[in-house]
């Protein structure tokens, strides 16, 4: 009798709202022990949660150093690997970005089956291994293949990071964590060439990859110590397994039990972003806009060296400093974005709302995105006429500032729009076009500058960004109606 009471007590402690062993076995569902259950990652101590968030952000920063860290040393890569095509030399930099687009679509769904933690660790090992492969490459085929595969692994922290932060923070307190996490993808491609320029000038281009491998390996070791599993489904499955063993009741099931097979999970992850692009004009247009802005930034990343070494006589080391302006602009945008976001939340609460209307996120894009075009005009025409080098760099500051207010509001708008169930697919669609553009738009850079020169070439890009400005205004005014008409379901 005492043993039976013990079994009942153990069972009740793990069944949340159901919690009575005399109910039919098929209805016994294992849930958290109430909203304050300390096993739920959202209720972990603050220092534990922030340790996870900071570590994930560091992993995202490290893997985002890789896309452009080798850009200042591209002339050495071209010479050593006998690259004779400008297209191939550009792909040597940008093909990593294509890996970021493709890899997470295949690897991230596995986190729904096996948890986030093993995917983080496996992808980091894979990233470091193929970065070392780049350092040891002896021909262009090896270099490009290793570059692509390291990008496939390097995109995983960005794909999983948003889900990990959602596991750890409530919606109302998610803004700061998401901003910190987003700094990696935004500033990594800027800080990479800054360090890479000095490394390539002092030690050669291969050492840019050795340093990247050392940094990535160090971050991976720290992650091995600090990171814990945060996926609620995995944690509840473990709890269910423990309770089955304690109670000898094989009918217990987790509230978040996965109903699909791993192949079905992977299939849905591949299909749903594509379906969203087809069925939702909001997702399609915003993804094209974000893709254009991201592609322009990577076009600049791959051409800065030629512009400032050719027009202004910068060295390999000092040309890396040019990238700093974009990074400073994005960092400067963060406190402004947070202040505006706080005001938006306060206005919603004053109206008795728990959260602002999703379209409110687009206001910041409407206000600040024209800065990208302004910066492109300044950068292009001052580089064309060789105005003092500080002036085109000021132009790049405007580009970076405006780009932040396109990328961040678009991401938050899609998350708010589709909720927890559809956000991953919406962001997946957005990231797919974003990184495909970042891979292939830079290929047009050398030919465009040869044909239109720096003035009209960058002006063309500026006019393209201006062509997208009416769409955020349209979505802001009529987004609710458009959402109701498209009626995308998950």
Image (cartoon, helix red, strand yellow):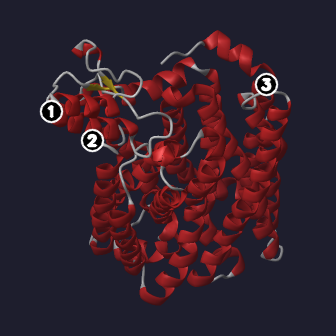
Residue drawn at point x = 50 percent, y = 40 percent: 36
Q: Going from the N terminus, do you reach mark 1 or mark 3 first?
A: 1
Image point (39%, 42%), residue name: 231
Please state if 472 lies on the left or on the right of 443 as rendered.
Answer: right
Whole-percent x, y for residue 461 in the image: 71, 47
Numbered disc 1: secondary structure = helix
Q: Nearer the viewer, residue 437 or 476?
A: 476
Q: Would you call the spot at circle 3 few (<14 residues within 10 Å), some (14-19), or many (20 or more)?
A: few
Quadrant in the rendering for residue 484: top right
Q: Name the quadrant containing residue 387.
A: bottom right
Q: CA distance from mark 2 to mark 1?
A: 34 Å
**Percent x, y of residue 43:** 50, 46
For the residues marked 2 and 3, what is the alpha-carbon distance in whole angstroms? 41 Å
Q: Nearer the viewer, mark 2 or mark 1?
A: 1
Q: Position of residue 177 (x, y in %)?
A: 60, 52
* Real-space CA distance between mark 1 and mark 3, rounded to the nearest whole angstrom: 66 Å
Residue visible at 78% across and 19% down?
478
Mark 1 highlights which residue?
A: 3
Find residue 245 and report its horizontal and vertical position in percent: 15, 36
User: Which residue in the structure is indicated by mark 2?
Assistant: 114
Residue 215 as seen in the image, left or right of residue 26: right
Query: Is any atom of residue 381 visible in this view?
Result: yes
Number of the label disc, if any, that sits on residue 474:
3
Q: Nearer the viewer, mark 2 or mark 3?
A: 2
Return the residue nearer the eye: 454 or 409: 409
The quadrant of the image that shows the N terminus is top left
């Amino acid at each position: 009798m005492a043993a039976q009471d013990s079994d009942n007590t153990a069972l009740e402690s793990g069944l949340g709202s159901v919690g009575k062993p005399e109910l039919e076995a098929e209805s016994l569902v294992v849930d958290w022990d109430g909203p304050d259950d300390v096993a739920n990652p959202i209720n972990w101590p603050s220092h534990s949660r922030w340790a996870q968030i900071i570590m994930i952000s560091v992993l995202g920063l490290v893997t985002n150093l890789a896309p452009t860290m080798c850009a200042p040393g591209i002339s050495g890569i071209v010479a050593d690997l006998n690259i004779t095509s400008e297209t191939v030399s550009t792909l040597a930099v940008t093909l990593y970005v294509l890996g970021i687009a493709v890899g997470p679509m295949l690897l991230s769904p596995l986190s729904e089956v096996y948890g986030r933690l093993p995917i983080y660790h496996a992808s980091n090992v894979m990233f470091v291994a193929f970065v070392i492969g780049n350092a040891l490459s002896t021909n262009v085929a090896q270099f490009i293949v290793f570059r692509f595969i390291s990008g496939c692994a390097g995109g995983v922290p960005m794909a999983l990071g948003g889900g990990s932060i959602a596991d750890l923070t409530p919606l109302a307190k998610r803004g700061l964590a998401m901003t910190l996490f987003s700094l990696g993808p935004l500033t990594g491609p800027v800080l990479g060439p800054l360090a890479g320029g000095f490394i390539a000038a002092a030690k050669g281009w291969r050492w840019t990859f050795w340093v990247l491998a050392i940094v990535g390996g160090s971050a991976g070791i720290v992650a091995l110590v600090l990171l814990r599993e945060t996926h609620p489904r995995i944690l509840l499955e473990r709890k269910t397994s423990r309770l089955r063993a304690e109670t000898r009741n094989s009918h217990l099931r987790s509230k978040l039990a996965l109903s699909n097979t791993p192949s079905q999970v992977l299939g849905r992850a591949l299909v749903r972003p594509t379906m969203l692009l087809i069925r939702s004009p909001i997702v399609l247009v915003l993804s094209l806009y974000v893709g254009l802005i991201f592609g322009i930034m990577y076009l600049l990343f791959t051409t800065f060296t030629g512009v400032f070494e050719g027009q202004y006589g910068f060295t390999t080391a000092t040309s890396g400093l040019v990238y700093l302006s974009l990074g400073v602009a994005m960092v400067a945008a963060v406190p402004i974005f947070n202040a505006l976001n706080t005001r938006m939340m306060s206005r919603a609460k004053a109206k008795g709302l728990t959260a602002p209307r999703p379209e409110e996120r687009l206001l910041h894009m409407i206000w600040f995105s024209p800065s990208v075009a302004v910066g492109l005009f300044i950068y292009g025409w001052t580089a064309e006429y060789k105005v003092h080098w500080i002036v085109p760099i000021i132009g790049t500051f405007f580009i970076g500032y405006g780009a932040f207010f396109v990328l961040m509001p678009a991401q938050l708008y899609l998350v708010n729009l589709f909720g927890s169930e559809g956000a991953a697919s919406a962001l997946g669609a957005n990231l797919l076009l974003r990184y495909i553009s970042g891979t292939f738009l830079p290929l047009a850079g050398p030919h465009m500058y040869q044909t239109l020169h720096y003035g009209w070439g960058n002006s063309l890009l500026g006019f393209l960004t201006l062509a997208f400005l009416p769409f955020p205004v349209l979505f802001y005014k009529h987004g609710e109606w458009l959402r109701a008409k498209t009626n995308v379901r998950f």
